[in-house]
Amino acid sequence: MTSFFEVKNLQVTYPIHGGILGRQVGAIHAVEDVSFHILKGETVGLVGESGCGKSTLGKSLLKLIPANRGEVLFENQNILALNRNEFQPFRKRIQMIFQDPYSSLNPRMRIGDILEEPFTIHGLCPKAERKDKVIELLQIVGLRPECYEKYPHEFSGGQRQRIGIARALAVRPDFIVADEPVSALDVSIQSQILNLLNRIQNDMGLTFLFISHDLNVIRYFCDRIIVMYLGRVMEILTRDELLDPHFKKHPYTEALLAAAPRAHPDKVRQVKPLKGDIPSPAHPPSGCVFHTRCPEAKDICRQQIPLLKNKVACHFRERDEKTVA
Ligand SMILES: Nc1ncnc2c1ncn2[C@@H]1O[C@H](COP(=O)(O)OP(=O)(O)OP(=O)(O)O)[C@@H](O)[C@H]1O
Ligand SMILES: [Mg+2]
């Protein structure tokens, strides 16, 4: 099957400035040599601890943050190489849902105007028809037509996130990057928003990159999962592989699973949750970036960077190509 979306050897760094002259003295390696693909209609999860580069990766796919190196192929076109005008038609097709429903909506604009804005920006649908389109969008995300006249402060967090989702859907995108869309919400509201996203994905056949630090959310929602640590991909696995206790996973994936709250706490857990903090991305460890926290680390892990081979980047998880989904 051909890839709908493909990322090749992507690198994104943030400069660190210092001294009285404010010169660049170093760099934060937020995304390092990341490669993966997404098929049309697939929901792919991106999981990893806070600060591992998930949001940076997501934003760089929409060119909101510039990449230093690598390619982002959308239907085989490298969108990183396009100028502003050339990128415009792609910009409409890729939308982002942001983590914080409180700060992502302009408090001075009515909901109707917020949702009409994407039509204006992209010159879609005649002005006279826009109000009807917005009301249709409000209905899709489970909000009443009266919301058109209201302001963001009149809504709860869950309702604001519904508005954020409606805004992303306004231009009928093909691909949505959802960056922690439920992490700022109460647990009871989280499942409503996840159900809404699931329904939208099924009804509209959208392709999703779903970013979360919560494996429980990821395993509910995603067909395949990319596990990231300190800017690098550690493993890519299917939901079935993630849930299969006999499938030998990357030690980091095992540790993330061990740390996630479980539905069946009575079952014995064999892997100890991770100890210690994630190292600084300004000075990533040599060799395998996970070696400083890995219970299985050997000399080779300190010396050689393991390549992502057959969907796993670990010197001690060699996988047969035929067994990989
Ligand atoms: N604008 C910025 N300037 C400098 N460094 C940044 C900037 N944004 C992020 N970083 C750094 O880049 C690294 C990756 O950050 P990023 O926000 O992508 O992580 P994340 O996985 O999304 O974390 P979280 O789960 O907390 O949202 C972190 O070390 C962060 O401090
Ligand atoms: Mg983030």
Image: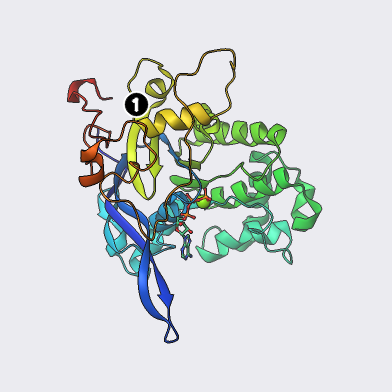
Q: Residue at x 34, y 19 (%)?
A: 247
- Rendered residue at 39%/42% (across/down): 228
167 sits left or right of 298 in the view: right
Question: Residue extending furthest bottom?
Answer: 21
| Secondary structure under the numbered disc 1 in the rendered image | loop
Q: Amino acid at mark 1?
A: Lys
Residue underneath mark 1: 249
Picture coordinates of residue 205 (x, y %)?
Answer: 46, 35
Residue 318 image point, x, y percent: 21, 28
Dividing the picture into quarters, in which one does residue 309 lie?
Answer: top left
* Distance from mark 1 CB to nearest ligand 1 atom below 8 Å: no
Residue 308: x, y in percent?
24, 39
From this viewpoint, is residue 223 visible? no
Q: Foreground: 208 or 119?
A: 208
In this view, 322 is above or below 7: above
**Which quadrant, please, contains the C terminus?**
top left
Which quarter of the image is occupied by the N terminus? Answer: top left
Q: What is the count of numbered marks? A: 1
Q: Nearer the viewer, residue 83 or 65?
A: 65
Asked whether, in this view, residue 202 is left or right of residue 27, the answer is right
Which residue does the image show at 67% across and 33% down from the upper left?
A: 192
Q: Is residue 129 above or below residue 300?
A: below
Image height of 57 relative to 42, above or below:
below
- Percent x, y of residue 245: 41, 16
Using the image as rendered, state which of residue 122 and residue 109 is in the foreground.
109
Rendered position, 15 above or below 57: below
In terms of image quadrants, where is residue 233? top left
Category of crowding for the residue at label 1, using alpha-carbon neighbours closer than 10 angstroms: few (below 14), some (14–19), many (at least 20): many
Quarter assignment of residue 152: bottom right
Please indicate, yes or no, whether residue 94 appears anywhere in the rendered image: yes
Residue 286 is left or right of residue 165, and the answer is left
